[in-house]
Image (tube, rainbow, N blue to C red):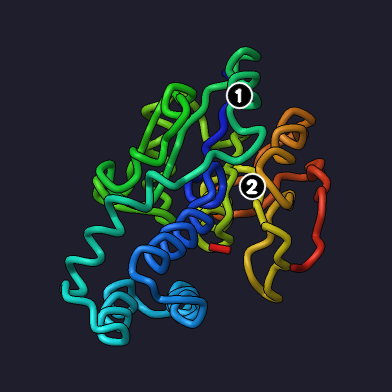
Amino acid sequence: MRKFAIFDLDDTLVDSTGAIDRWFVELAQRRGLGPDGLEFLRAEQTRPVPPEESFRAIVDHFGFPESADELREVFAEGMPLLVRVFDGVLENLRSLREQGWRTALLTNGTEIQQRPKLRDGLHDLFDVLCFADDEAVRKPAPEIFRLVAHRAGSRLDGGWMIGDSLEYDVAGAAAVGMSTIWVSGGAATATGGPVPDATVRCVAEAFPVMLRGRAAGRTERGGHPPGPVRAPAVTTAPADT
């Protein structure tokens, strides 16, 4: 059986959080909002509320002529064009495939939302593209991981999941027997939360971990078979979703 890896997209392979900030910077410049206005936009970017609430707050605060829904549509069209593929992604994915790995992309979101982020030929480096919001279930449901493996003609046991979300990527994949790599961006794991098999600051550091491998995959529901060799964490230093 060929080696198999599933990758998350946003803030794993591409700089989505950075793209959101770049879009807000452009908005502040176009509308002459000044430093205080940009500070307000950035605060809304990180406020833990649904997107529609943030856009409503922005429209109300600045008195924009468009509605919150209209501004959100402008954002949805423009933000993906500002996404950048992280350093090391393209060359390392090509190398994996040259070494016989099967690769899949699994991202929550629709194809319409997510495909524009697959820039610079990134979309050509996967055997399977799965946009979970176009399917019956999304991460972290076990069924979505099984669906991706089925489409790739691969097994989950012994496969790798690489992503930036402990809840959606790490816990979801561990529950179906995959080894997991958390792309932490320098953040620390929460006490009592999901524990990845390896932690890296950036996705480029995940590829050597995968190539070193481990003796066996997890069993279903996150248990380990006797005597597994855990891939060492590259970093656990504290500091993005």
Residue at horizontal 51 percent and vertical 47 percent from the top: 176
Which image quadrant: the N terminus? top right
Please state which of residues 79 and 160 is positioned toward the viewer in this rendering: 79
Q: Quadrant of residue 37?
A: bottom left
Residue at horizontal 55 percent and vertical 54 percent from the top: 221
The residue beneath circle 1 is: 3
Mark-to-mark CA distance, 2 and 1 = 14 Å
Residue at horizontal 47 percent and vertical 28 percent from the top: 120
Q: Amino acid at mark 2?
A: Thr
Q: Residues within 10 Å of mark 2 (few under 14, many from 20)?
A: many
Please state which of residues 215 and 14 is positioned toward the viewer in this rendering: 14
111 with respect to 236 (left or right): left
Residue 156, image x, y percentages: 53, 36
Please state which of residues 60 and 163 is positioned toward the viewer in this rendering: 60
Residue 150, image x, y percentages: 39, 30
150 with respect to 98 (left or right): left
Above or below — where is 229 with respect to 90?
A: below
121 with respect to 235 (left or right): left
Residue at horizontal 40 percent and vertical 76 percent from the top: 33
The residue beneath circle 2 is: 180
Please state which of residues 162 and 56 is positioned toward the viewer in this rendering: 56
Residue 88, image x, y percentages: 66, 33
What secondary structure is found at the residue carrying circle 1? Answer: loop
Q: Amino acid at mark 1?
A: Lys
What secondary structure is found at the residue carrying circle 2? Answer: strand
Above or below — where is 47 with respect to 178?
A: below
